[in-house]
Amino acid sequence: MAELNKFEAETRGEFGIGSAAQFGSADLKKAVHVNENFRRANFTSADMRESDFSGSTFNGAYLEKAVAYRANFTGADLSDTLMDRMVLNEANLTNAVLVRSVLTRSDLGGALIEGADFSDAVIDLPQKQALCKYANGKNPITGVSTRASLGCGNSRRNAYGSPSSPLLSAPPQKLLDRDGFCNKDTGLCEAK
């Protein structure tokens, strides 16, 4: 089994499409990994504080519960990553691509997000609202503005939260026609 894992790592993962690198629970504090390929790598619970991953590729990587306080992900491709419960306080996500990433229960307090693309990312509503307060810029790779990718100013996109916060994810009252006491003119229903 160890030989197979070694072979996969040497051939850039299963079928040659990823790094297969294993950094689960690794101590990567202040490490420098600029412009590297970490596609489909495992960083679960890794300590990535103050590390530099600028320009690196993380497509499909697992980063849940990782601590990346003040880490540099400038221009990194973090699309399709699982970043659930990740600590990204004061991380630099300038011009990063986070398309379709899962950031549920993650903390992005003070993160630099100028030019970051969060299109179709799953982010808890309170976190999304906090990011919208200072979101700006346009991603140089995708051409999408940070504010638009977060749905800032769009009450419909911000209204429901995410699957991780079901209480905030409830549909509008007019769609809750459970009691049968709905006003046909307005579509609103009385809750009993």
Image: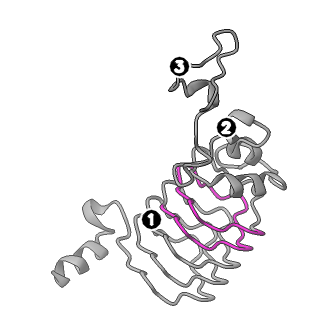
* Residue 105 placement: quadrant: bottom right
Q: Could you tell me how far apart the alpha carbons at marks 3 and 1 are, in whole angstroms?
A: 46 Å
Q: Could you tell me how far apart the alpha carbons at marks 2 and 1 are, in whole angstroms?
A: 26 Å
* Residue 156 placement: quadrant: top right
> Foreground mark, 3 or 2?
3
Residue 99 highlighted magenta (yes or no):
yes
Q: Nearer the viewer, residue 83 or 9?
A: 83
The amino acid beneath tag 3 is Gly
Find numbered disc 1 in the image and state the secondary structure of the residue it sits on.
Answer: loop
> Foreground mark, 3 or 1?
3
The amino acid beneath tag 2 is Arg
Residue 92's place in the image compared with 99, above or below, is below
Q: What is the x, y in percent for residue 184?
A: 63, 10
Q: Nearer the viewer, residue 187 or 128?
A: 187
Q: What is the x, y in percent for residue 157?
A: 67, 37
Task: Bin the neighbour count of mark 1 within 10 Å (Cα to Cα): few under 14, some 14-19, many 20 and up.
Answer: many
Q: Check if mark 2's residue and mark 1's residue have beta carbons within 8 Å.
A: no
Q: Nearer the viewer, residue 12 or 163?
A: 163
Q: What is the x, y in percent for residue 82?
A: 48, 61
Q: Which residue is mark 3?
A: 180
The span shown in magenta is 82-110
Task: Bin the neighbour count of mark 3 within 10 Å (Cα to Cα): few under 14, some 14-19, many 20 and up.
Answer: few
Q: Which mark is residue 157?
A: 2
